[in-house]
Amino acid sequence: MTASRHYVTTTIPYVNSRPHLGFALELVQADTLARHWRRRGSEVRLLSGTDDNSLKNVLAAEAEGVDVRVLVDRNADAFAALSAPLDLSLDDFIRTSSDPRHRVGVERLWRRCAAAGDLYRKEYEGLYCVGCEQFYTPGELVGGRCAEHGTEPRRVAEENWFFRLSRHADRLHRLVSDGVLRVEPAVRRNEVLALIESGLHDFSVSRSQARARGWGIPVPDDPGQVVYVWWDALGNYVTSLGYGTDEAAYGRWWAGDGRRVHLAGKGVVRFHAVYWPAILLSAGLPLPTDVLVHDYLTVGGRKISKSGPDTVDPVALTDAYGTDAVRWWLLRDVPRVGTPTSPRNG
Ligand SMILES: [Zn+2]
């Protein structure tokens, strides 16, 4: 039976450069699902946006010699402008650095988790991949390099806020294995279960203002620290609905009995199917009902990325072949189920 309400989201990309075709795949998948459910009579809300607060954006601006605000605004506009050439039926588009709804909601989420006793300060030293915006243990690296980016992570030592992920492991495992939190396809669900079974460690959820170059959302009551960009970014799924600013809209789309569906690429499964649900459990909020994971678009076996040599401009492609042809090709020829991902997820 079709639920009466479907909230569908894409991930929000970093805006360190212009959009590439790989992200267009996710946009078109999400748009197609949203259109399908609308035609079946559901109320649907389709959200996309941009992750403005990444350190990656700051480093890109430094490399280009422009102010980070200038770079972020320019590239975010290019992402928002995909809507017309890809014929997206977006209901909302959130930008995490400039949307007044966002910061309020992120701060509230933080305070809820703090009140639950799940945030604490700790001296920490680790290996950080700026490309992934995440710490790795040496065992998760391949030849000392990030499996996703092929780059050597930086050694970072500072005092950070940590989130008690470990506390939520058992509950999370049950929710995923029971299908209350549905992770599809099965190969990805099994990866998530294996990751939880391997032992979940508390993770760093802030960085110093110095390392963040003063860019991002300050930690509530601790302005020397900036909220970890993934915490900030994942929060968009509820802040865009009005979590902390518009309880009626939030209640309608997130706290009601409809489906809450996240689309995400295979490289960010742990964030969507482990970290985010754990943060929500801690805050006492409902979880997403579905995390639908797609593979990457590849050229000659390599992932298409914004910064790689194989970047393809989706707008140029629709100019050349037309919107429907590009949409059809993305949906028809790109497999949704593929090979297992890098060792860090398995
Ligand atoms: Zn990486």
Image (cartoon, helix red, strand yellow):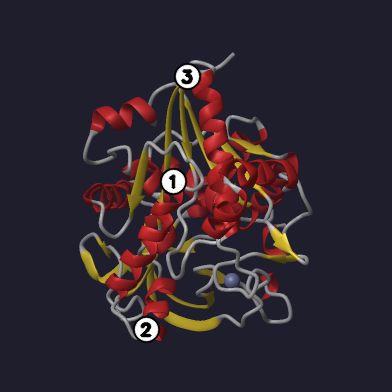
Q: Residue at x 59, y 34 (%)?
A: 175
Q: Is residue 317 above or below residue 57?
A: above
Q: Secondary structure under badge 1?
A: loop
Q: Which sits earlier in the primary sequence, circle 2 or circle 1? A: 2
Question: Residue 288's x, y, as percent?
Answer: 49, 36
- Neighbour tally class for label 2: few under 14, some 14-19, many 20 plus, Cα within 10 Å: few
88 and 151: which is toward the camera: 88
Give me the C-alpha separation between circle 2 and circle 1: 31 Å
Residue type, numbered disc 3: Ser
Residue named by callout 1: 84
Question: Residue 79's x, y, as percent?
Answer: 43, 56
Which quarter of the figure has residue 305?
bottom right
Q: Is residue 221 above or below residue 207?
A: above
Task: Answer left or right for 201 relative to 89.
Answer: right
Task: Answer left or right for 295 relative to 212.
Answer: right
Q: In this view, does 266 lie above or below 39?
A: below
- Neighbour tally class for label 3: few under 14, some 14-19, many 20 plus, Cα within 10 Å: some
Give me the C-alpha separation between circle 1 and circle 3: 24 Å
- The answer to whether residue 162 is seen in the rendering is no
Which quarter of the figure has residue 52?
bottom left
Q: Which residue is drawn at 42% across and 41% down?
A: 47
Residue type, numbered disc 2: Glu
- Neighbour tally class for label 1: few under 14, some 14-19, many 20 plus, Cα within 10 Å: few
The quadrant of the rendering that contains the N terminus is top right
